[in-house]
Image (cartoon, rainbow, N blue to C red):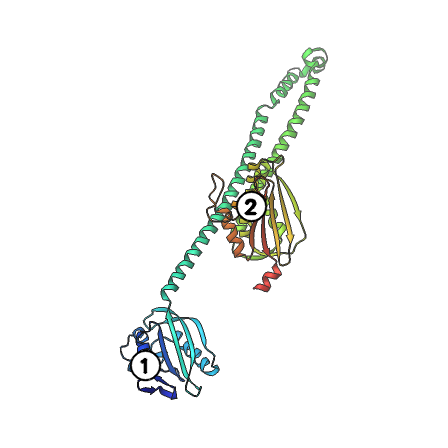
Amino acid sequence: MQSQSSSTAPDGAWSIDQALAVAFLEYVPDNIYFKDRESRFIACSRSQLRVFNLSRMEDIIGKTDFDFFDEAHARPALEDEQKVIRTGEPMLGKLEKETWPDGRVTWVITDKLPLRNAQGEIVGTFGISRDVTEARRTEEALENARKELMDASRLAGMAEVATGVLHNVGNVLNSLNVSATVLANAVRESKVESLQKVAGMLTEHKDDLGAFLTQDPRGRRVPELLTALSRHFEQERERMLAELKSLQEGIDHVKDIVSMQQAYATMISVSEALDPASLMEDGVRMNAAALMRHDVEVVRDYHNAPLVQVEKGRVLQILVNLIRNAKYACDEGAPPAKRITLRVIPQETTVDLVVEDNGIGIPPENLTQIFRHGFTTRSNGHGFGLHSSALAAREMHGTLTVHSDGTGRGARFTLSLPKAEMASVAA
């Protein structure tokens, strides 16, 4: 193709074919611009003119970003261009937020490169901007949706903890009701009336008490009756003391569960350096009544471990779920002896809190889905517990994993939490 007449760009830039340049700048969809060493526009694409609501090239020549944008965008853009001029290094793929005088906000991906003349000298910059506002808005919407889902899952997990609290309190209240019933029956069936009858006979014969106790057949039985009543009241006292002790322990247990839940609920967003064994024990206490009622043995294998950097509320959410699920697994698997083994094992940068059961186990096809939102194998389950637990572990820079050798062979869940000193280094 025969070359057309050429023109030389300002500031001594090399000659370019004007016809090709005009065609390119007229129809290219991206926003392309050329600037001199003072970051003043010397040329741009038609699409760039439309962005600035201009119709002629002459309307942009000599102007800067400060004529079109507010300080929040124009100043960093100028600094970037001057850096490209000083160093000769291009700036590629930068996400820029454009704030316009009327308050509009747009987003672009920008490449800025040095503009050289025929001698290779840097005489300005040129750039290409691609509008990604809609993509950015979609990304923000997806991020908001993700956060809302995580919040919903977290709330569901907290609801599981609250449900666990109510369930355990209910179990304790059942025990309290049994103890109260035993005490009420003991009072109703007391031999106090027999004692009153003996006292009445002695009062009736107070003037001839000696003769009554030695000669009257009824009087001769009084020492025997008093001995029997004494033995009965002693046994009754022991029974009632035992029930009162059980009653008091149950009340204390309810108080502990409620106060523990209150403490964790108020500290859910506070990250602390905490003892992993104590965290495990708190999870056990929250499930203690149910574990006792279902005859589940708890075996502890706690190794010496450093503190972990975690949020108490989230750890409780996870452990309550894991221990309760282990109890259900033992019920469904019905092993000869139901057993849950709790382990605390230090690793190089983490501490593992392990909840292992000898229950129903998990088939291989379920292992990859078990942490998925809504997945459950229980008829009355909703699939929030393990999903929200996995999210909570991830937000504390930890992990929650599962292993099972298959149906009928139990399962092992491992909550790995960062050591306190490692969390400090990462921060």
Mark 1 surroundings within 10 Å by alpha-carbon count, few (fewer than 14), some (14 through 19), many (20 or more): few
Instruction: Name which residue type carries label 2.
Output: Leu
Discs 1/2, front = 1
Which residue is labeled 2 in the image? 322
Q: Distance between the Cα atoms at labels 1 and 2?
A: 76 Å
Numbered circle sitting on residue 1: 1
Give the answer, above or below, for where 11 lies relative to 154. below
Q: Which of the two residues, 390 or 119, is positioned nearer the viewer here?
A: 119
Which element is circle 1 on? loop
Assess whether mark 2 and mark 1 are in contact (beta carbons under 8 angstroms): no
User: Where the N terminus falls, by quadrant?
Assistant: bottom left
Identify the residue at the far left of this view. Answer: 55
Image point (48%, 81%), residue name:
87
- Left-right relation of 334 to 147: right
Measured from the top left, where is residue 105 in percent x and y? 36, 68
User: Where the C terminus falls, by quadrant?
Assistant: bottom right
Give residue 147's quadrant in the image: bottom left
Image point (55%, 29%), residue name:
181
Measured from the top left, where is residue 151 in percent x and y? 45, 53
Measured from the top left, where is residue 275 in percent x and y? 62, 53
Which element is circle 2 on? helix
Name the N-terminal-most of marks 1 and 2. Answer: 1
Give residue 175's quadrant in the image: top right
